[in-house]
Amino acid sequence: MARIAEPRPAAEPSSAVQQQRRDAILQATAALAAQKPADQVQMNEVARAAGVALGTLYRYFPSKTHLFVGLMADRVDRMQDGIQRRKVPAGTAADRVFDVLSRATRPMLRQPHLTAAMLNSLNTADATAVAEVGHIDRQVRDMLLTICGVNDPGPQDISLMRLVQHTWHGILQSSLNGRIDADETENEIQLACRLILAPLSEVPS
């Protein structure tokens, strides 16, 4: 049976050395997937580029889906760090969310193979088998609600922000598939934010 089908959870690093190995795997994955489609990226070449044993790679990432979702989670962590360092933008909730998503979108579109690999893996992964799927969804949602100043979101606020996330992913996919250009991508993200977030709890001035 192929390793990708093994029903076992991914291991978490328990030491600084193990974290360094995991980080090296993610860096190697990003470099390889930036050059070619995900289906051409082989697990053994990722391990070789990262300087780790193949067994070590599979310990942290039991499948290629785990690998690209893990990379997406790492990018979301970096995204949050960047938001925390910047001054909160002025404007409505839609303006603030658009600012965050447009900043995230531009570098993603400059690496279409890598972005497609992360999005496809995130959208097809079983959240019960790939724990980081839920982590990514919650982190992005909470990040966007916080930037809006909604610190005690109600069920509708959470649902609205989830709709923004789903719509953003769809717009990104359309751009990656060549259906819309970069300007249309940005305009549609902005429009989606305005339409979806109109009922969001009022943003403090």
Image (cartoon, helix red, strand yellow):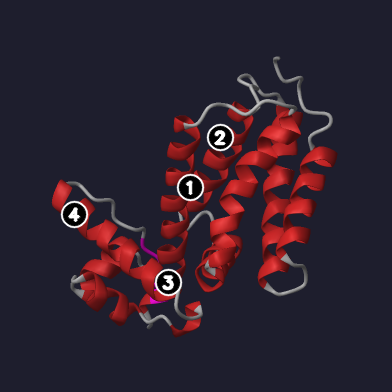
Q: Residue at x 42, y 71 (%)?
A: 64
177 shown above or below 135: below
Identified by mark 2, the residue type is: Met
Give the magenta-colored segment's residue range.
4-8
Residue in front for this viewpoint, 90 or 67: 90
Q: CA distance from mark 1 to mark 4?
A: 21 Å
Determine whether 183 is above or below 51 in the image. above
| Disc marking residue 18 | 4
Kindly report the distance in space between the C-alpha atoms of the residues bearing marks 3 and 4: 19 Å
For marks 1 and 3 on the same chain, the one whose residue lies earlier in the sequence: 3
Q: Residue at x 70, y 63 (%)?
A: 182
* Residue receiving disc 3: 64
The kind of residue tagged 4 is: Gln
User: Looking at the picture, how far across and down is residue 148, in whole percent?
Assistant: 66, 27
Sequence-first disc among 3 and 4: 4
Residue matched to label 2: 143
